Image (cartoon, helix red, strand yellow):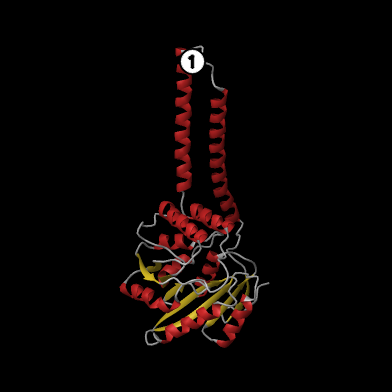
C-alpha cells in the first residue's frame, strides 16, 4: 500500500482548513484499499487562530501533523517545511481555503500511477479575483521565459509529485525557495489534469501586490541567469544605438553646420542610458545580495512548534 502525504500551507484559515482536512479524509477513505495518507498543516505565522485550529485537529485526528513558524516566511517556505516532514510515496500540495478540490485528488494520483513524475491541476474556470488572475498570468509568462516551462503546461498551487522529486526538492537549502523552479529543475515528465475550481468560502487571497512582486522577482533570479543575459543584450543594443546616434549627429553637423546640436535630445539620451545602467547595476546587486544572504546561512524558515511530527521539540 502506497502512502499519500497532503501538504497544506495555512494563513488566515482558522475557519476553512478543517473543512479541507475533512474532505481529504472522506476522499481517501474511498481509496483506502490502495493508499494510506497523512496531512501536514504548516501555519505561516497567521495573525488569526489558525494555529489553534491546527492544534485541535492534531489532537482529534492522528493522521494530522502540525508545524508552526516563528514568523511569516511565505507560501513556498511553508511548502518546503511540509515536504521535508512528508513520508508519502506521493506528495500532494493544495490550498487551505477550499478552492482546490481535495475530492478530485484521485485524478492527480492516477496520472502519477501512469508514469508521470509530477501532475498539476488545471482550471477551466478560475474563481480568483481579477487581480489574482493577472498575477497568475504574469507568473506563467515568467516561468515560461525564465525557467523554460513548456508553453502547454499549466502550473498551479494544486499539484502532486513522486517521492524522488520531493527528495531532490528538499536538497535545496538556500534562502529563497521557489517550488515551481525546483519541480522543473528535477523533471520535464509533467502533465495536467482538469479539475474544478471553487469559489472562496471566506476571506481574500493572502497574496498582496507586494508579495506577488516578491514572488515574481524570486522566480526571476532563483533558478536562472537569463535576466543577466537579457541585461547584457539590452546594454549591447543600447550602446550600439548610442554609437549610431553619435555618428548621425557628427554627419549631420558636417552636412549642415548651421543646425544646432539639440540639448533636449542629448538629455534624453543621457537619461535613457543612465536609467539602463542603474537597472542593470540593480539586477547585478540583487544576485550579489542573494549570494551574501545565502553565505550567511539565512534560514528558509524557523519552526516554533511541532505537533505529531518526528521532532517534538519546540524552537523558540
Identified at 57% across, 82% down, the residue is 308
The image shows a total of numbered marks equal to: 1
Q: In the depicted view, which residue is nearer to us: 289 or 195?
A: 195
Q: Residue at x 39, y 62 (%)?
A: 154
Q: Give the x, y percent position of residue 200.
A: 52, 71
In this view, the residue in front, 122 or 61, is 122
Quickly name the residue at label 1.
253
Q: Secondary structure at mark 1?
A: helix
Instruction: Give 132 or 175, whichever is nearer the viewer.
Output: 132
Pointer 1: residues within 10 angstroms few (<14), some, or many (20+)?
Answer: some
User: Which quarter shows the C terminus?
Assistant: bottom right
Residue at image location 55% in from the left, 68% down from the top: 78
Which quarter of the image is occupied by the N terminus? bottom left
Q: Position of residue 173 (x, y in %)?
A: 53, 62
Q: Based on the displayed image, in which of its 4 quarters is residue 141 positioned?
A: bottom left
Rendered position, 94 above or below 242: below
In the image, residue 315 lies at what x, y percent?
Answer: 65, 73
Q: Which residue is depicted at the point 44% across and 75% down?
A: 101
Q: Is residue 85 above or below residue 173?
A: below
Residue found at the far right of this picture: 316
Image position, residue 309 (x, y; %): 56, 79
Would you place residue 245 above or below residue 278 in this image? above
Amino acid at each position: 500500500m502506497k502512502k499519500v502525504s497532503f501538504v497544506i500551507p495555512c494563513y488566515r484559515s482558522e475557519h476553512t482548513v478543517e473543512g479541507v482536512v475533512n474532505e481529504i479524509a472522506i476522499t481517501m477513505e474511498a481509496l483506502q484499499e490502495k493508499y494510506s495518507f497523512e496531512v501536514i498543516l504548516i501555519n505561516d505565522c497567521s495573525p488569526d487562530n489558525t494555529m489553534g485550529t491546527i492544534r485541535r485537529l492534531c489532537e482529534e485526528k492522528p493522521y494530522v501533523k502540525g508545524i508552526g513558524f516563528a514568523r511569516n516566511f511565505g507560501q513556498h517556505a511553508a511548502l518546503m517545511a511540509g515536504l521535508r516532514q512528508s513520508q508519502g510515496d506521493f506528495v500532494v500540495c493544495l490550498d487551505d481555503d477550499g478552492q482546490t478540490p481535495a475530492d478530485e485528488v484521485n485524478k492527480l494520483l492516477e496520472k502519477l500511477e501512469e508514469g508521470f513524475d509530477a501532475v498539476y491541476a488545471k482550471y477551466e474556470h478560475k474563481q480568483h479575483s481579477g487581480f489574482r488572475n493577472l498575477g497568475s498570468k504574469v507568473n506563467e509568462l515568467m516561468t515560461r521565459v525564465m525557467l523554460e516551462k513548456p508553453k502547454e503546461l499549466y502550473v498551479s498551487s494544486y499539484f502532486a509529485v513522486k517521492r524522488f522529486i520531493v527528495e531532490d526538492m528538499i536538497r535545496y537549502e538556500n534562502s529563497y525557495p521557489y517550488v515551481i523552479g525546483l519541480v522543473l529543475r528535477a523533471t520535464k515528465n509533467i502533465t495536467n489534469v482538469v479539475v474544478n475550481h471553487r469559489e472562496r468560502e471566506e476571506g481574500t487571497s493572502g497574496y498582496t501586490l507586494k508579495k506577488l512582486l516578491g514572488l515574481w522577482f524570486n522566480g526571476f533570479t532563483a533558478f536562472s541567469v537569463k535576466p543577466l543575459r537579457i541585461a547584457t543584450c539590452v546594454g549591447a543594443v543600447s550602446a550600439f544605438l548610442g554609437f549610431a546616434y553619435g555618428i548621425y549627429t557628427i554627419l549631420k553637423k558636417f552636412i549642415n553646420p548651421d543646425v544646432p546640436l539639440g540639448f533636449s535630445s542629448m538629455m534624453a539620451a543621457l537619461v535613457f542610458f543612465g536609467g539602463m545602467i542603474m537597472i542593470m547595476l540593480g539586477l547585478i546587486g540583487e544576485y550579489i545580495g542573494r549570494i551574501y544572504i545565502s553565505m550567511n546561512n539565512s534560514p528558509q524558515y524557523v519552526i516554533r512548534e511541532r505537533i505529531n511530527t518526528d521532532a517534538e521539540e519546540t524552537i523558540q
